[in-house]
């Protein structure tokens, strides 16, 4: 089996597709407004019939946007970013009836067992994940040099000494091209660098430290005083951790603000639509995504991420999306929100990230 799944395009010689009409285009009536009967995009490969004998594949299609056609090319645009007069694809069928084809079987592999009834067909906490790990090791080795690996992290990654060190190692060795998180991940990572605590608890022994509940607040104050995380790393003498590794290796990160934030850190983006746009720029480039212990960020980034990517040579490859959590609920919720390509690895993030690093660092 090929490392990266091979894409099988539709057979446009099928009679019903040869007879398909051209897609209907309607102008956006105003900025930020889609025409009636607009076609809402999915994260599956979608083709639009833009002229006779030409079905254009939408690049980086993602959920809940619209298609804009110009000069026989298709662009994917969030409705709020439409401009009056943009020619928007309309129609709500998916099999060519209106010049729109949603192709959701392009990456399907033939299963060895095609029985209609079988046990253990769905991933649960009882599922063995040995193959998932082995496949992920190889995908990350490939995408380190030939792709764009994005991590979406909850603060739990910084609450454990070994997981924090493992994530630092992955970043420093090229296995991270973009990091998405909230204010808490960065705050507690810097807290660990200075005080060796997370929310006042020692990140190795788990013992609570005297007055430790002040630690993250003091960190927020000191970083805000320095003016930025980068400046604080220098002024506070920080030489370890996730944010240190990002700054040292010029790995971009987006810290999306929340109504729950303390501080926040200077880099935290308070405008939700600005942070969404910044995150989306990485989602559109992503070839592999790993989300860990952050349900809302995982769902949000899953909605932004295409299920496939068109490479410069025209090759279409899948975007691999892993959700790592102790609970099936988080993975199920992501799939229920449309990110059917998400693959769950059900374990705690500390065990996962340390296992990953131990296999990739050699």
Image (cartoon, rainbow, N blue to C red):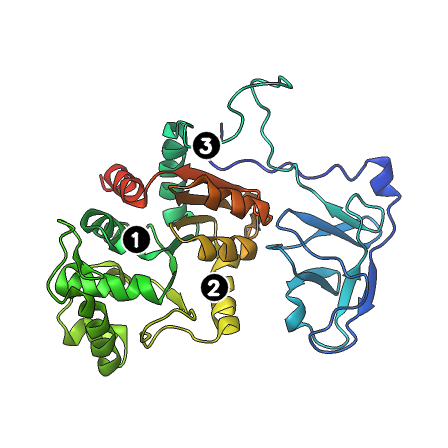
Say whether disc 1 or disc 3 marks the residue closer to the N-terminus.
3
Say whether disc 1 or disc 2 marks the residue closer to the N-terminus.
1
Q: Is residue 120 above or below residue 9?
A: above
* Count of numbered tags: 3
Residue highlighted by disc 2:
279
Tag 3, which secondary structure? loop
- Residue 196 is marked as none
Residue highlighted by disc 1:
156
Classed neighbour count for the residue bearing mark 2: other residues with Cα under 10 Å, few (<14), some (14–19), many (≥20):
many
Residue at (82%, 51%) from the top-left corner?
99
Q: Nearer the viewer, mark 1 or mark 2?
A: 1
Do we see residue 163 in this rendering? yes
Q: Is residue 290 above or below residue 277?
A: above
Q: Picture quarter containing residue 142?
A: top left
In three-dimensional space, the C-alpha distance between marks 1 and 2, rounded to whole angstroms, equals: 20 Å
Position in image of residue 46 (x %, y %): 69, 49
Tag 1, which secondary structure? helix
Position in image of residue 325 (x %, y %): 39, 44
Residue at (80%, 60%) from the top-left corner?
90
Classed neighbour count for the residue bearing mark 1: other residues with Cα under 10 Å, few (<14), some (14–19), many (≥20):
many
Residue highlighted by disc 3:
124
Q: Is residue 257 above or below residue 309?
A: below
Say left or right for 27 vs 187: right
Residue at (32%, 77%) from the top-left corner?
266
Position in image of residue 201 (x %, y %): 17, 57
Position in image of residue 322 (x %, y %): 44, 43
Say left or right for 126 vs 92: left
* Camera-side residue of 265 and 254: 265
* Camera-side residue of 59 and 34: 34
Tag 2, which secondary structure? helix
């Amino acid at each position: 089996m090929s490392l990266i799944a091979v894409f099988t395009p539709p057979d446009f010689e099928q009679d019903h597709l040869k007879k398909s009409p051209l897609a209907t285009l309607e102008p956006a009536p105003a900025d930020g407004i889609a025409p009636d009967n607009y076609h809402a995009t999915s994260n599956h490969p979608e083709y639009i019939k833009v002229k006779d004998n030409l079905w254009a594949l939408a690049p980086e299609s993602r959920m809940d946007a619209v298609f804009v056609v110009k000069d026989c090319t298709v662009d994917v645009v969030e409705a709020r970013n439409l401009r009056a007069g943009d020619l928007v694809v309309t129609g709500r069928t998916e099999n060519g009836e209106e010049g729109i084809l949603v192709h959701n079987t392009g990456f399907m592999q033939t299963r060895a067992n095609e029985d209609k009834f079988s046990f253990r067909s769905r991933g649960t906490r009882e599922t063995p994940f040995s193959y998932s790990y082995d496949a992920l090791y190889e995908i990350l080795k490939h995408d380190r040099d030939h792709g764009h690996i994005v991590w979406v992290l909850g603060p739990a990654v910084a609450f454990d000494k070994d997981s924090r060190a493992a994530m630092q190692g992955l970043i420093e060795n090229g296995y991270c091209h973009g990091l998405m998180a909230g204010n808490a991940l960065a705050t507690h990572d810097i807290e660990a660098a200075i005080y060796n605590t997370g929310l006042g608890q020692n990140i190795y022994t788990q013992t609570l430290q005297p007055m430790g509940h002040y630690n993250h607040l003091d960190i927020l104050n000191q970083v805000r005083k320095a003016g930025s995380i980068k400046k604080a790393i220098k002024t506070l003498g920080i030489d370890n951790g996730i944010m240190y590794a990002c700054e040292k290796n010029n790995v971009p990160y987006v810290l999306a603000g929340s109504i729950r934030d303390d501080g926040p850190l200077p880099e935290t983006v308070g405008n939700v639509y600005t942070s969404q746009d910044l995150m989306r720029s990485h989602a559109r480039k992503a070839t592999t995504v790993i989300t860990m212990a952050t349900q809302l960020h995982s769902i949000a980034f899953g909605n932004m991420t295409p299920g496939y990517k068109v490479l410069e040579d025209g090759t279409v490859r899948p975007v691999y999306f892993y959700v790592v959590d102790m609970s099936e609920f988080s993975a199920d919720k992501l799939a229920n929100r449309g990110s059917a390509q998400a693959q769950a690895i059900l374990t705690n993030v500390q065990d996962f990230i340390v296992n990953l690093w131990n296999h990739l660092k050699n």
